[in-house]
Image: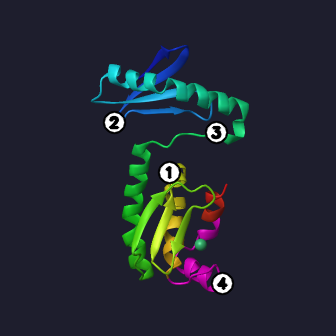
Amino acid sequence: MKKIFEIDGLQITAQRKCVKNVRLYISPKDLQVNLTIPLFATEKFALEFANSKINWLKKSLEKIKANPQHIHLEISKEEIEELRRLIADMVPQWEFRLGVQAKEWKLRKMKSRWGTCDIKTGKITFSTSLIKKNLRCIEYVVAHELAHLIVADHSKKFYAVMAKHFPYWKEIRKELNQ
Ligand SMILES: [Zn+2]
């Protein structure tokens, strides 16, 4: 059930969901401000949270209206944790499949790349922007970065490894970069 509140002249659509944290975001479709209230939180608590972010919301809306192509949506802590869980599930599976082992992996804000692999240290970094992508795209990036532990560059050999273990990599890469 949705409920509409008004804070400082701004309409906020609130909805209760089974989530851990309060979430406030601007929908890219209709520029509606949405507030997700966890089942166990009070409405007052969630509205106070929204109230504390009102200046950020107004500034973001102005920015989006001035330049609709550059919608900046804040990625919540909750989303990052969800991405971390997804990747934590995928990494061991792909390590096993490819017969490699990453020294460590982490998430980082990266604008121009989905992931990087430092083959000297065996450390892999994934972009937090992956949260906006679907599971197969995330899995593609996980497989891709781990495959670099077999072949460092983007040579034919590398794509042969990808093709062997991830037959639809080309289609999914296209989807990822759309
Ligand atoms: Zn690569």
Q: Is residue 76 above or below residue 41?
A: below
Neighbor class of circle 1 (other Cα within 10 Å; few <14, some 14-19, many 20+) is some
Type of the residue with mark 3? Ile
Q: Which residue is mark 1?
A: 131
Q: Is residue 80 above or below residue 146?
A: above
CA distance for labels 2 and 1: 19 Å
Type of the residue with mark 1? Ile
Tell me if residue 107 is in the magenta stretch.
no
Q: Position of residue 143 (x, y in %)?
A: 50, 71
Of labels 1 and 3, earlier in sequence is 3
Q: Which residue is mark 2?
A: 18
Residue at 55 percent across and 13 percent down: it is 9
Question: Residue 23's image quarter?
Answer: top left
Q: Secondary structure at mark 4?
A: helix
Q: Is residue 73 above or below residue 154?
A: above
CA distance for labels 3 and 4: 37 Å
CA distance for labels 4 and 1: 29 Å
Of labels 2 and 1, earlier in sequence is 2
Q: Quadrant of the C terminus?
A: bottom right
Work out whether residue 31 can be spotted: no
Residue at 70 percent across and 36 percent down: it is 68
Q: Position of residue 29 (x, y in %)?
A: 62, 33
Q: Which residue is mark 4?
A: 156
Q: Looking at this view, is 54 or 22 the one in front?
A: 54
Mark in front: 2 vs 3: 3
Q: Looking at this view, is 8 or 30 the one in front?
A: 8
Q: Position of residue 70 (x, y in %)?
A: 68, 41
Question: Residue 121's image quarter?
Answer: bottom left
Neighbor class of circle 4 (other Cα within 10 Å; few <14, some 14-19, many 20+) is few
